Image (cartoon, helix red, strand yellow):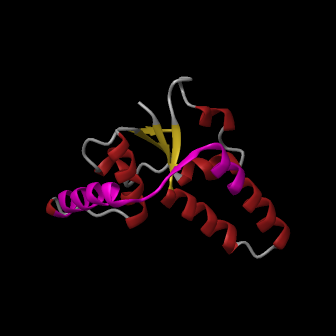
Amino acid sequence: MGTVVDTSVLIAVERGQLDPARLDGEDDDEEVVLSAITASELLHGVHRLKNAVARTRAERVAETTFATFRVIAFDIDIARVHARLEAELAMRGVSIGTADLMIAATAVWLDYRIATRDLRSFPKIRGLHVVRW
C-alpha cells in the first residue's frame, strides 16, 4: 500500500518538526505521492509570504518536493470518488473541508493510506486508512 502525503506533513517537515526521511516511505516498494490539491495548498502558502527571500526559498522547497514525488492530478476518476464520499458524509450529517475531501478521494481512488498530522477531518471518512506522521 502506498501513501498520499497531506499538506500538514510537508509543513511539519519544513518547520523541522518531522524528519524528512520519513517521506521516503516505510518500505522501498511503497510509493509516496502528493495530490494536486496538496501541491496547491503548499503553493498557496508560498504566495502568502510577504518577504521575497522567504517566498523564493519556500517556492524552491515546494518545487523540489514536486520533482521528488509523483503528483496525482484530480481527474474524473477521482472526482467520482470525491462525489461518492461527499454524499456519504452528507447523509451522515458530517462535513469536512473541500480540499481535505479531495485529498482523501485521491487516496481512496489509489487504495493508498493518507499520512497526516491533522486528525480532525480524515478519520471521518469510512474506509480511509489514516496514519499520523
Residue at 56% across, 31% down: 25
**Residue 41 vertical position relative to residue 65 in the rendered view, above or below:** below
Inspect the magenta stretch and tell me whether residue 73 lies in it: yes
- Residue 113 at what x, y percent from top left? 40, 38
Q: How many marks?
A: 0
Query: Considering the image in quadrants, where does the N terminus appear?
Result: top left
Residue at 63% across, 48% down: 12
Q: Is residue 99 visible?
A: yes
Residue projecting furthest to the bottom? 50
Residue at 74% across, 60% down: 58
- Residue 60 at what x, y percent from top left? 76, 57
Q: Is residue 19 visible?
A: no
Inspect the magenta stretch and tell me whether residue 27 lies in it: no
Task: State whether the magenta stretch is mostly helix, strand or loop.
Answer: helix
As drawn, is 51 to the left or to the right of 14?
Answer: right
Magenta stretch in the rendered image: 62-90
Quadrant of the rendered structure where residue 121 is? Answer: bottom left
As drawn, is 15 to the left or to the right of 42?
Answer: right
As drawn, is 121 to the left or to the right of 90?
Answer: right
Front-most of residues 20 and 24: 24
- Residue 28 at what x, y percent from top left? 56, 23
Front-most of residues 1 and 133: 1
Front-most of residues 21 and 15: 21
**Residue 64 vertical position relative to residue 113 in the rendered view, above or below:** below
